[in-house]
Every structure is written in structure tokens, then in C-alpha cells.
Image (cartoon, helix red, strand yellow):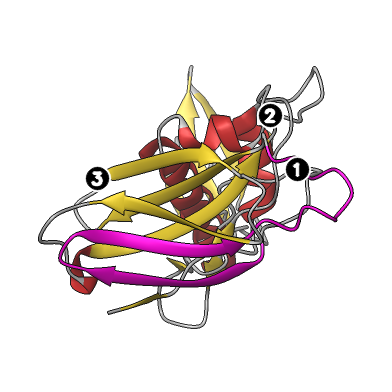
Amino acid sequence: MAIAQNPLTGQMHGAMGNFVTSTLGGQNIIRAKAFNQQDAKTESQVKQRTSFKMVAEEYVTFGGVTDMGFPEKPKNQSAYNLFMAANLPGAIDRSGAEPIIDYSKLVVANGSLPQLIVLGGTIDANGITIGYQSNMLIPKVSETDEVVAVLKTTIGEVLITRQPRGSDSESFISIAYPTINIADVKCCYLFVRSADGKKASKSVFIPLIP
């Protein structure tokens, strides 16, 4: 910044070329314009902020499910932190004009327990039915583990069914919802927790067949 009082020019104000002039206390003040203006709202930055907001909102909409699903956390971390780390940027589809959530890649639970092997999911007028293998011969697997099925509808309802893993080679878990149809479903997942709730498996997205 330069300050000048020129008896020939007198008081100065306004812009001249790369300079902006004004008068303060009877003195002419000249400031140079910035040569390079940085725009903090580039397209990639806007998409990144939008993606972060979308994933954070998903954490909220699942309520306590995500807290159940991320029990294995360091003392300086929360279930929210782990959920955000698991889903940014993996669960965001940026192929279109605007980023959207890819629910087939969203992770609502994660941990050290083996991931469930799903046999399939069906939907009918009574609700959702999911088949899975108990896999009792896999290390860290216990028949007392709790299998958790989660359904989220297009209007934001979240339904949960929990049951013991059991020792049968194959089992089924159902979410009762009379009159539901495939158009009402936003996403469905299955994961398992230890009986004491201290460990969990990574969630599995369930494609549903009418």
C-alpha cells in the first residue's frame, strides 16, 4: 500500500488500472489489486463438501444402527468418525452432474468379525426374508453372535431385526413389514455382532428379489 498527497492531483478516489485509490484523513491511499484471485469454491471443492454433508446425513438417518455397527473404535474415535472414514469417498457416486449415495457400497457396520455369507434376499407382501450361512467352522464365529438385518425405506423408516446366529448350516432372518413392495425400499443390509456387542462384521448390502 502506498500513501501520497500530491498538490497537483489533490484528493484521489476510484480505480486506475491495477490500483485502487481512496482518501483518508486528507491523504491519498493507493492499493494494488490482487494479481491472482483464488476461488475457494471450485467444482471439485463444492462436490467434496456436498459429499461430506450427504454421508454425515446418512449417519444420522440410520439412528443407532451405525453406533451398533462400529463398536471397535479407538478411544479417540467415535462411531461417527469410523462411519465417515468407511464411506468417504467409497460410497459416493460422482459420475453424474451431482454426487449421490451409492447404497450398494455404503458401509453401515464394520469390524474384525468375519463377514456373513448371504444366500439371497426376497421381498413379498409380508416383508423381507434373508438367507445366510452360519459358517460355524470359521475362526471367531460363535453361535451366540447376533445377526442384524436393517431395512431403510424411501420415506426414511429404519427397521431392525436381530437374532442369534445359531448352529444350523443355513438360517433365515425376516423383517416384518406388511404390504411393503420393492419400490418402498431404499436399502437393506446384514451384519453380525458378538454377543457382548464389542465386535462386529462388515455389513453386506442385500439386493432384494420380489
With respect to residue 58, does 129 lie above or below? Answer: below
Q: Which residues are magenta?
A: 117-143
Residue type beneath disc 2: Pro
Residue located 45% across and 29% down the image: 64
Residue type beneath disc 1: Gly
Residue 157 placement, left or right of 170: left
- Tags 3 and 1 in contact by the CB under 8 Å rule? no
Return the x and y of residue 41 as percentages of the image width and height.
Answer: 52, 57
Q: 44 or 180, which is in the foreground?
A: 180
Label 3 vs 1, first from the N-terminus? 1
Return the x and y of residue 177 as percentages of the image width and height.
Answer: 20, 52
Instruction: Name the residue that disc number 1 marks.
Output: 111
- Residue 141 in magenta stretch: yes
Instruction: Name the residue that disc number 3 marks.
Output: 157
Rendered image quadrant of residue 68 = top right
Residue 78 placement, left or right of 9: right
Q: Secondary structure at mark 2?
A: loop
Whole-angstrom CA distance, mark 2 to mark 1, is 8 Å
Q: How many neighbours does mark 2 have within 10 angstroms: few (below 14), some (14-19), or many (20 or more)?
A: many
Label 2 vs 3, first from the N-terminus? 2
- Residue 118 in magenta stretch: yes
